[in-house]
Amino acid sequence: MERVLERFAAGYAADQDKLSGKGDDQSSIHYPAVFLFIGDKSAEAIEPMMRINHKKWDNSAGVMYFHVGTGRAPEGPHSGHASRSATGNPGAASPASGKTEISSGAELRVSRFTIDAGPAGQDPKTLRKELYRSFYRDEEQLYALNRALRQLSYNIADYGRLYSSFDRIHLSVITRVDDPLNVFIPEVSLLAQSIFAQSFKSVQMDLYVLISERDQMESFGYGSSAGVAFLRELEVMQSPDYSFSAKLHVTEDGLSIPVTHRPAPLFDLVYVLSDKNERGITAAHGMQDNYEIICHVSLLKNRKQKESHFDMNTGGYNNTSFKNNVMTESGRQGYVSAGFSRVKRPNESIALAVLYHFYGGLLSRMKNVPEWGFKEKMSFFGLHPAAISEQAERIVPDGGKIAEMTGMMTHPVSYGSLKRMTLRDAEEALFGGGCEAYFQSNYVQETELRLKQLQAGEGLGERIRRRLREQSAVGIFGIALWTDEKNGGSVLEAVRSRIRDLSGHLEAEKAELARYYEERVENQPFPKRPLMEKHNVRSFIRFFFETVYRRKLELLRIETELKLYRRYETELARIHAEYKQKALELTEVEETLLHAARASIREADDYIGQNVMEYYGVVTEELMRELESRRGEGVFFEERYMGSFAELLDEGRERMLMRLIDVCRRELLESEAFDQTFEEELLNRANVTAEYGNRQVLSKEELFKRLYRTLEEHAVINLRLLEYTQEHRYEEKYFFGDAESEFIRYAAAADETSRIYKLGVVHEKRSSGVEKLNLMGGFHLEDLMYYRNGKVYYETYVQNGYEFHGIDAERLPELK
């Protein structure tokens, strides 16, 4: 059941995201953008980032993605790659851009270049160093990389119509801190920059360093050492006097041309992002938030300004100003990190809350048992006296064979002898035990046989199921209640009362028959003729059978009726146990749904789950009543909706739950009541009517305050630093949302007089939610907890013969 509920909630949320996002305004990037992924471990970021950009940017079809890896990482759905040919002919290398379809149907472009990393199982002691050296030794590979990057540059030109300007290109380099291929990041980055510079006036290049501390659970020693090695190299790359020159350009004729970088930091800005945040807490969504950060930072730095007053005076991002603020007085460039949060309609919680309230509404209707009297209840069960009497009549053979008894052989007895006898003695004198034997054989035994063949209990159970299908006013709870012997108005009580009445009546009739048997023949009112012995005997015999044995037949019918009632008494006790268990199961399902809804709301703290239960309880009940007013009071128990819960339970709780979900989605969740913008839904929940003194329900202002605080708390920086407030900390914070919305206006004004950071708004006309990006810069290598912790491993590995660097050790900064 839990898996079914998870699939239901996730499916509804996914569908709602698609629907609610249709009306959202997409941003555009101003200049062309390329994302360059270096290392096998960074490959997993490609597709998530493509999806994010496709959803956010209306010109995302022109964004290029380039991956440099060894080919040993698991291949994704992107087939394009570039590598040396099998013959080793440099001219045969043909990088190809592959196309991939994503769920939205948009066509995005990604290229892969495979680096020769040497044989698998290479000595880890020298892996990074050998990779670096082999990069320079293999001219064929270097030429193929040139071709691949040049092809990428040509591909970008094909999408020129999508961009406002081709003067600049934004190159974002993404790598994992512990990936060995980041050893030649300067070479690949500068080669790409050099090739792009032939088509663009300027190339703005940023580096995103991803730290996955979760992945280092198994190889924390080597992984930490490799990570620290790269950070030391990064210090060199970002130093103000960093220069570079190497023959990286290779022509088709095998001629090499230097690529030169004059003294300056290699990257415009370096962003360091971890899966453990500033508070030391592991991110719930792993690396996904970091992919969101990269995409949002890229948009912030490269967004096309719209012709709208919303883009004026809203604290727009200024890259030069930000760089200056994260730089020390000595000119040392600080690193940057970021945090990201999003608030949207809590669709999963809403789906589960509506399902719970819908089910609860159905149960309350089933528990609302009609206040019927005994007569109506007995009629519902088919146990009213007339019905059981008719059933007994059908079981007991008809009286036709009583008349046939007059033809039985008799003993020669004169009427003169008979008339002074009792009826009992006369029967014995005339027939011996023949009459009783005949009656037993033709009536009593036949009745018992028919009773055995009649499955009265199953018949009652089937009748109840049939009536439950027909009679929506009575459900499982009604059956359980009406068959409960502890309930004063139960059918069981009525059946037992009927059993007592019939038993008393039967005993009275038996006593009356016994008394009648003792009467004398001559006193009986049958036709008698003087001096006609034989006539009088025959007349008595006819009278005897029509009175005595007709009475015996009636006693047999009463006994049969009594047996039927006793059978039903036993069956009602069994039915009570069955339906009591079904009622318990229904209640347990309700508890399961309640638990799932509450758990989802607790988890949806990011999305502000306050008042979800209160608000959607009201909405669900209103929708149910509206449907009942249009289609009839018992509509939900009709076969095209829920049908019989008893039969659904027989198929299992999961089957019942799936039917419930189907009806809930079709009849409730697709109604107009759920077609609201994020803010409309939030405000409606904030203002839901509640009883006086209910402190769970928040005012609009209080809800906005909590929403603002929640966005801030969940946008905490994704990096663990040694000091929470290090010396050069500088912050900027940006909301992505509708600047006209009530919440954004509230957020822009909150803490306006006391804030010590820059606050901006990126206006996007949207209905699905609000996002927040927090930027923090100014920290340095020695501020990173990752660096502090990994330094011990790095030093130990170096002392044990590990060589992590391709460049000379003299160029590296001292360990801090």
Image (spheres, rainbow, N blue to C red):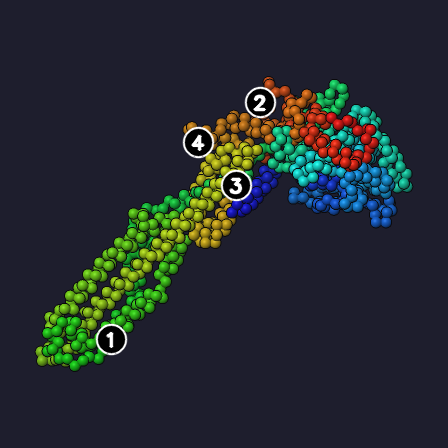
In the displayed image of the protein, which residue is found farthest to the left? 530
Q: Which residue is mark 3?
A: 351
Q: Answer with mark 3 or mark 2, whichever residue precedes in sequence.
A: 3
Q: Which residue is mark 4?
A: 690
Q: Is residue 694 left or right of residue 148?
A: left
Q: Is residue 560 left or right of residue 428?
A: right
Q: Is residue 18 left or right of residue 610?
A: right
Q: Answer with mark 3 or mark 4, whichever residue precedes in sequence.
A: 3
Q: Are marks 3 and 1 in contact (CB under 8 Å)?
A: no
Real-space CA distance between mark 3 and mark 2, rounded to the nearest whole angstrom: 32 Å
Real-space CA distance between mark 3 and mark 4, rounded to the nearest whole angstrom: 21 Å
Name the amino acid, label 2: Ala
Residue 338, percent from left and from top: 66, 29
In the displayed image of the protein, which residue is found farthest to the bottom? 412
Q: Residue 379: in sight, yes or no? A: yes
- In what quadrant of the picture does the C terminus appear? top right
Residue 264, percent from left and from top: 80, 25
Q: Residue 46: in sight, yes or no? A: no
* SS assignment at label 2: loop
Who's the residue at 47% across and 41% down the image?
594
Residue 112, percent from left and from top: 76, 42
- Of residues 87 and 744, which is closer to you in this image? 87
* SS assignment at label 3: helix
Q: Answer with mark 4 or mark 1, whichever residue precedes in sequence.
A: 1
Name the amino acid, label 3: Ala
* SS assignment at label 4: loop
Name the amino acid, label 4: Ala
Q: Which residue is mark 1?
A: 404
Q: Residues within 10 Å of mark 2 (few under 14, many from 20)?
A: few
Q: Which mark is residue 711?
A: none
Q: Which mark is residue 750?
A: 2
